[in-house]
Image: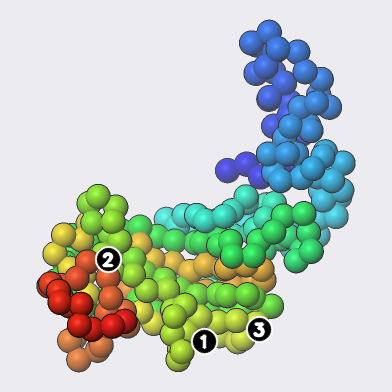
Amino acid sequence: MRSFLDAKMMAKSLRQALADRKIDLSHGDCLELVAKQFGFQEWNMLAARLGELKPDEKRLRFPSRWEMSGSVVPGTTHQLGLDPTMPGAALVKSLVPRAGEINLTGKIAVLLQNISASESVGKRLKLSAYLRTEDADIGTIYMCLSSAQGTSMRFDNLLHREVDGALKGTQDWTLRTIVLDVPQGAESIHYGFFLKGYGKVWARSFELIAVEADIAPTAVHSQYLDRPANLDFSQPS
């Protein structure tokens, strides 16, 4: 996947593609277009960013069988991948300064896996992982159970918990868990961890296992009700 580190190569490819279509743009014009694609106002700003790169801001190796999602421009807004200084840990890190040109407030960067729910329907699943944060707005794990149509049937990301919720600021390794029942009709299971806003979040030791009924679900609400309820509007929220 290309990032702003490939800007010059992308500008060269863009110029050639346009020339093939009888559109003549200079290399400089193509550099300006590529810079705007990555959220910079002009090429000089992107060039300065390239010149400021520190060794630990270069590409991280990406973990096999994992994917990235969210408000991510790899290498420009975020780094996602294996932390070479922490064996067995993955990192999601914002690269944009809090007062920078690109506003990451409320944006998320996710490292995730998607698996089939076929062997888990009717079971109660527990997702667990250790998280560590540094100057993070929010760092958390999540799990979502989806139907064949892509509708979320069960979901938890710790954000609404008063106890054992998402991590904020700077915190050392902390265990977090999610427990969800896999309903009939569930097609897929999606889980991982994400950074919301600015900062850094690490994760390690992910585990997804079936548990017994004596372990309570962490999210009892879902996209669908289990049965009709409050049909006479007698129960306020």
Q: Is residue 58 visible?
A: no
Disc 1 target residue: 174
Which is more N-terminal, label 3 or label 2? Answer: 3
Neighbourhood count class around disc 3 (C-alpha, 10 Å): few under 14, some 14–19, many 20 upward: some
Camera-nearest residue between 130 and 153: 153
* Quadrant of res 132: bottom right
Which is more N-terminal, label 1 or label 2? Answer: 1
Q: CA distance from mark 1 to mark 3?
A: 11 Å
The kind of secondary structure element at disc 2 is loop
Circle number at residue 170: 3
Q: CA distance from mark 2 to mark 1?
A: 29 Å
**Residue sitting at x 52%, y 56%:** 70
The kind of secondary structure element at disc 1 is strand
Q: Looking at the picture, which amino acid does disc 1 mark? A: Thr
Circle number at residue 150: none
Camera-nearest residue between 58 and 180: 180
Which tag is nearer the camera, tag 2 or tag 3?
A: 2
Camera-nearest residue between 52 and 70: 70
Question: In the current view of this chain or complex, which residue is farthest to the top?
Answer: 22
Q: Quadrant of the N terminus?
A: top right
The percent position of residue 197, horizontal first and vertical second, equals 62, 67
